[in-house]
Image (spheres, helix red, strand yellow):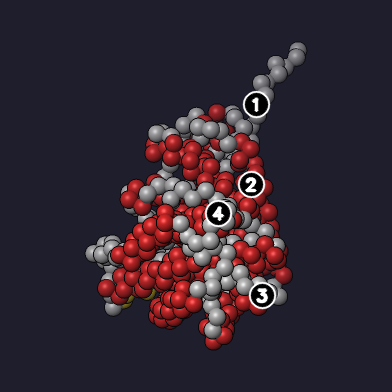
Amino acid sequence: MHQTAKPRFSRTRAGCLTCRSRKKKCDEVKPRCAGCRRNQLACEWPSGVSSDKEATVVARKLTKIEDADSQALVTISAPVSISNIGSERACGLTPQSGTLLSHYFRETASFFAMTPLKDNPFVTVLLPIGYTDDLLMHGLMALSGSHLTYKEPNNTALATATQLHYSKLLSGLRAEFSNLRDDDWEAAERLLRVLVVVCHYEALSGDTQGAIFNHLRASRHLIQSLLRSKSTKHAVNSDTLGFSLELYAHLVTCNTITPHGISSGRDLPLDNFIMTPEEMKLFPTFGSIFAGGHGLFQLVPEVSLLASERLAEEASGVPRASALLLRTHDELLDRITCWKMPPPSSPKETTEDWEHRRRAAEALRQGLYIYLSTALCGSLVSDPVVICAIQDHITKLFGFAAQLVASQYVATMLWPFVIAGSCMARPVERQALLRHMRSGWFSMRHLGIIGDTLELLWNDPDPRAYGPYGLHLIMEKHGISLGIA
């Protein structure tokens, strides 16, 4: 008597409980697998796999936030133990993964947001999600590793672990993009969240070949798809989407350091922030990166376009800026000068915190003045009056920086210092900037590379080697494409 053959199903013992009960193959992507997303089902995991709620609890265990004398006191725990985390999870991938996670929480995350750690979305938004989304966690680990390995250059185990997390990140991204459906908004928002982390990794790792710009282009494509769909708001997390949008806008802005359109590998469409700042204010995390200075950040692409238009006039034989460009220049100058820092964003913000944000915005304003001063000069800044005015703005910028360099409010000051650095003529200021970039601010690899590039600019005898256009000239000459985060 023959036994009846049992039907065969494509099953997995490691997948989510929902796919197991449906006898379907699970791609094991957390926190919500593709099958559950596609069929709009609750994605449940075995007790050994952290849920979103459990991840939040774990993240809270890493931090103890207390209030002492009306000041936020943040105490970071000892390096995270990974003894009870399986090696199939990003947190337990290597013996060094716990160290990378702890370093991310303790140091790396604080360098990218203009908020105290207790309000920093790199911790409060990304880290809890990372406990259930291994792809994002690989990104956070790689980002931390790019920072820590620069501080510990002889630690080969850390370097190997960082590279392993990065390779897992890239292979995972390729797989996710190959399976992405046009109407899977949740997956698109997740990939955007991961991509902006990858952009930060590329910058911190010291890449000089423009990898960050490829990721920014992919991010822009995802953003356009998300914002075009009326269904998006029902399928994505507004906290994470708002944070990703602000990060993208900031990354595009701070990498706009040359006239628009003259460096093909660096070119990004200047979408005026994809959304207006007023629209972005609707997201609960808005302001963690721009910190009230979004009105000034919004002017950076406009100045870059003005510089590009003047170069086009120069190439066509027009010796001086046209009346149209002069009017545009004056309008931009008026907007920069008349901009005022918004009042405190919440009743909890102290006068001291607001003053720190105002000083950071003033530093940005000085960078914008310098950028605008060079915009109508074309490829050669030679007018002594313009050069003298630029020097005055550099001096003011250093004054604001001295008050901010030891705080989290220095996070957005790299862009104005790159612009100012391209115009520095005084040796004492040059050396001060190099000292901070190579051994002071944050101990990050990409700052040393920016310092090296500025030094190439200062030492180049070409009279055009001055200002943002000169920076473009030097990058083209030496095959460098700086990435800033």
> Marks 3 and 2: in contact by CB < 8 Å?
no
Q: Which mark is residue 312?
A: 4
Q: Position of residue 10 (x, y in %)?
A: 65, 29
User: Which is more foreground, mark 1 or mark 4?
Assistant: 4
Label 2 crowd bin: few (<14), some (14–19), many (20+), radius 10 Å: some
Secondary structure category for the residue under label 4 = helix
Spatial CA distance of label 1 from label 4 is 64 Å
Spatial CA distance of label 3 from label 1 is 68 Å
User: Which is more foreground, mark 2 or mark 4?
Assistant: 4
Q: Which mark is residue 460?
A: 3
Give the mark nearer the N terminus: 4 vs 3. 4
Residue under the point 65% across and 26% down: 9
Residue under the point 67% across and 62% down: 476
Question: Looking at this rendering, what residue extends furthest in the right direction?
Answer: 1
User: Which is more foreground, mark 1 or mark 2?
Assistant: 2
Spatial CA distance of label 1 from label 2 is 26 Å
Give the mark nearer the N terminus: 2 vs 4. 2
| 419 or 37, nearer to the observer | 419
Q: Circle 1 sits on which residue? A: 9
Identity of the amino acid at label 4? Ala
Quarter of the image that includes the N terminus: top right
> Marks 4 and 2: in contact by CB < 8 Å?
no
Spatial CA distance of label 4 from label 3 is 24 Å
> Would you identify the image quadrant in which residue 438 lies?
bottom right
Q: Circle 2 sits on which residue? A: 172
Secondary structure category for the residue under label 1 = loop
Residue under the point 41% across and 66% down: 114
